Image: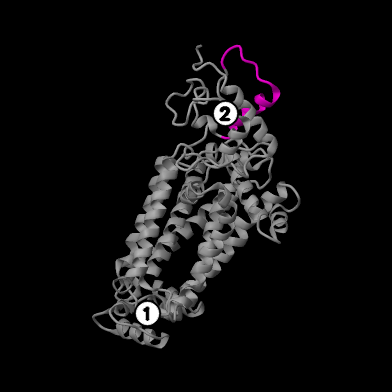
Amino acid sequence: MVAYAWRWLVDRFGLGPIWTKVFKRRVPNQPWYLGDGMALTVLLGVQILTGVALAFTYTPAVDHAHDSVRFLSERQTFGWFVRGLHYWSGGLMVVMIVLHVFRQVILGGYKSPREGIWLIGVVLLILVISTSFLGYVLRWDDRGMAGLKVALTIFERIPLVGDGLVRLVQGGPDLSTITLTRLYAMHVIFIPILIMALVAYHLYLIILLGTTAPAEHGEHVDTGAEQKQVYKEQAESPTEGEVFFPTAVIKIAPWSVVALGMALILTLTNGAPALGPPANQQATSHPREEWWFAWYSALTALMPAAYAPTFHILFPIVLFGGLVLLPFADRGPARGWRHRPIATTIVVILATALIGLSSWRLRSPFGGEASSAPPPIPRGIVLAEDARQGHQLFGRFGCVSCHPIAGAGKEKIGTDLARLERIYSQEELRSYILAPPAGVAMPSYAGRLTDEEMQQLTAFVMVVQTFPRTQGD
């Protein structure tokens, strides 16, 4: 009966060709390191399933989004687990897709006839990074709002189209529920549909053209026709080829097991990401990116502040433009890491830089969770209105997370502003905040403060410099 039912399903739904051409096709012997692509597919599946579950509760309205996320985290049955798994699998997906790109660069996986596979992969990289950022914003807490404002500021600086792009994202001249609805639709409908469609086409081309066969690594392959011949010969070889399912799948499955296991462990040990205070459009909070964007923030903090606005615009263009042009610029026949020392060296340097920058950012004084509570004021001191507003900004921007005030917060890393060697003028303070000196572990606040906020913040620091050296004095 079971056999009859199976034959009926195969016949009526046309499963025979799929089974033969997809699962039972022969492929070259699969090295274990090819499993990163399969792991990406598994993580994508986790993202889709958990995202659908979250969508049943999340409310894309500025007055309710934050509360709906809090309800998910604190009251919804297993809501913390679903949200945590969505969060950690999303971060691991960003890491895994970068590793996947690095591997293809090392092996020359973009070479003829696989240029189409590579170009679709570059688009998928952009989409994965974009949707990971949108998920961060949809919490609609102070950190998400800070991230959105930074992104809109970058868009606004794009010549000719900047203002129009900002209005398109916002749905008008200001941030509103329309903005949140548009971001939500991009995150849960438009980008996921694009990703799934492109992943399907990506896999179709891989089935059609194959991955980089081990035989290609030992010889120079000049044309796409030569590659197809080499791939076919190895796949059909009794000793060097194998059936994709289950033989090859079992070999490359450990990547998926490790990726899914890490997502589960991180979820069970750390839970869902902490939710900050509700977003406040009138206030500016201390921006803090997700851990998988930490390297980018560190890179920005290390460069002169005057170059940052141009860098934010040119860097993505140069990066993704370079990836698109790579298969057309590198036309050499060498494939495999042993024959590509320059590509391998570049990837090692880039990977080391990413890890180093991320580590520095996460360990830096301005890399931890910022305290939003304003610092204590010594007894008997009354602040003028500007300084009083600056006192609140000092907490809201996270300055209090690094800088002690008159001995309060002695374990912190930044300079105690009540114990400076001399009194700094308001203009000197302004210059320091906008462009911290080289070697100082402090981010530039250029573009993050309005003129009024800068006036208020520096007015408060001017008063702080006159405080007693300790709160008890």
Residue at 68% in and 45% down:
61
Mark 2 surroundings within 10 Å by alpha-carbon count, few (fewer than 14), some (14 through 19), many (20 or more): some
Is label 2 or label 1 in front? 2
Image mark for residue 55: none
Q: Is residue 263 magenta?
A: no
Q: Is residue 409 visible?
A: yes
Say which element carries label 1: loop
Q: Relative to 43, is 403 above or below?
A: above
| Place of residue 372 in the rendered image (x, y in percent of width and height, measured from the top left) | 56, 31
Query: 38 or 99: nearer the eye?
Result: 99
Q: Relative to 411, is 10 above or below?
A: below
Location of residue 386 (image quadrant) = top right
* Left or right of 255, for residue 312: right
| Place of residue 245 in the rendered image (x, y in percent of width and height, measured from the top left) | 35, 72
Residue at 68% in and 21% down:
384
Q: Which residue is mark 1?
A: 25
Q: Is residue 394 magenta?
A: yes
| Place of residue 153 in the rendered image (x, y in percent of width and height, measured from the top left) | 64, 50
User: As shown in the figure, which amino acid type bears the numbered disc 2?
Assistant: Tyr
User: As shown in the figure, which amino acid type bears the numbered disc 1?
Assistant: Arg
For the stretch drawn in magenta, the main secondary structure is helix
User: What span is in magenta?
Assistant: 378-397
Query: 418 or 56: nearer the eye?
Result: 418
Mark 1 surroundings within 10 Å by alpha-carbon count, few (fewer than 14), some (14 through 19), many (20 or more): some
Residue at 39% in and 50% down:
356
Q: Tell which circle, 2 or 1, labels the residue nearer the N-terminal end.
A: 1
Query: 378 or 455: nearer the eye?
Result: 455
Q: Which residue is mark 2?
A: 424
* Left or right of 334, for residue 412: right
**Disc 2, disc 1: CB below 8 Å?**
no
